[in-house]
Image (cartoon, grey):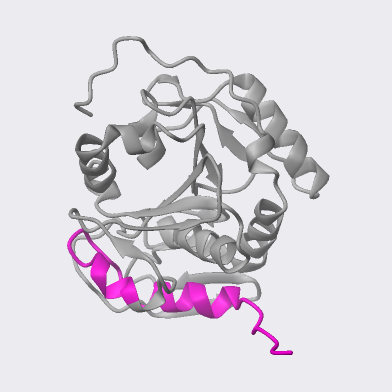
Amino acid sequence: MTKTNPFDFKNTFLNLTQYTVPYGYESQLEPYLPEGVQKDDFGNYFIRIGESATLFTAHLDTCSSEYEKVNHVFEGNIIRTDGSTILGGDNKAGVTILLYLISKGVPGTYYFFVGEEIGCLGSRAALRADASFFAQFKRAVAFDRRKVGSIITHQRGGRCCSEQFADALSHQFSNQGLDYQADPYGVFTDTAVFVDVIPECTNLSSGVWGEHTSEEYVDILLLEEIARAAERIAWDSLPTHRRLPSNYSQVA
């Protein structure tokens, strides 16, 4: 019987954050994406695992204007930089979590979007091209929120997921030993693009502090704890309560 190697959270994250990755450079990360991943016409990457009405998302670009080498600094569980660049934990923490879920065979469609930091370019383009594809999902889950404990219920000033959905997800995280609660103070990430076609859209904290700055850092053990909890969430059991608008236009 062949043993599979355990998922290495630290090295996966370090590989993904070797360089800052502005929009247009996302293809540099292809070697670290899973076998069988596909690429759409807009540069986004996606893969489907099993049967599920869940869309998982993360974005490959970072908030940077240059493709620059990142010099990692380690302080116990904390990974940061020497201060000369951002770290890129936003959103490589989320990418790491998705790669872990894929490695564990957690059912879902996984999308790695490009150009999130400059206006969700990849997700907007994908939705415009095929809204019916995304309409098949009951929930869209991003791992792109700072710190720990947030289940984002509002993005861009409007509701993106129901309180019933957030409460049920909070309860499941609690069963895994993590305190996640409904948070109405989201800004936006790619899941906000899909609020008119997917009933429950959220963004979950993934263990990143100081995003978009040279002070950015990630708690790698917390990131692992979040990922392992996410593996045990019964995603397809979560309720669907938010009603979609009746006047949806396919122009996102």
Identify the image quadrant of residue 133. Answer: top left
Q: How many marks?
A: 0
Q: Nearer the viewer, residue 233 or 60?
A: 233
150 vs 239: above or below? below
Tell me if 230 is positioned left or right of 154 in this view: right
| In the foreground, 195 or 152 | 195
Given residues 110 and 208, the one toward you in this image is 110
23 in magenta = yes
Question: Position of 97 compared to 198: left or right?
Answer: right
Quadrant in which residue 2 is drawn: bottom right
| Left or right: 146, with 45 as reference point | right
Residue appearing at x 61%, y 57% in the figure: 106
Q: Where is residue 75 in the image (x, y as percent from the top left)?
A: 60, 75
Does the magenta segment cover residue 42? no
Name the residue at the top extreme. 246
Question: Where is the N terminus found, in terms of image quarters?
Answer: bottom right
Residue at left 38%, top 13%?
245
Foreground residue among 166 and 22: 166
Q: Residue placed at 42% from the left, 74% from the top?
A: 35
Residue 19 visible in rendering: no
Residue at left 37%, top 37%? 134
* Above or below, 158 relative to 82: above
The quadrant in which residue 74 appears is bottom right
Q: Locate the C terminus and report the quarter of the image it occupies.
A: top left
Residue 223 image point, x, y percent: 61, 61
- Magenta segment: 1-30
- Residue 151 visible to the viewer: yes
**In x, y percent, where is residue 186?**
46, 32
Q: Position of residue 131 (x, y in %)?
A: 29, 33
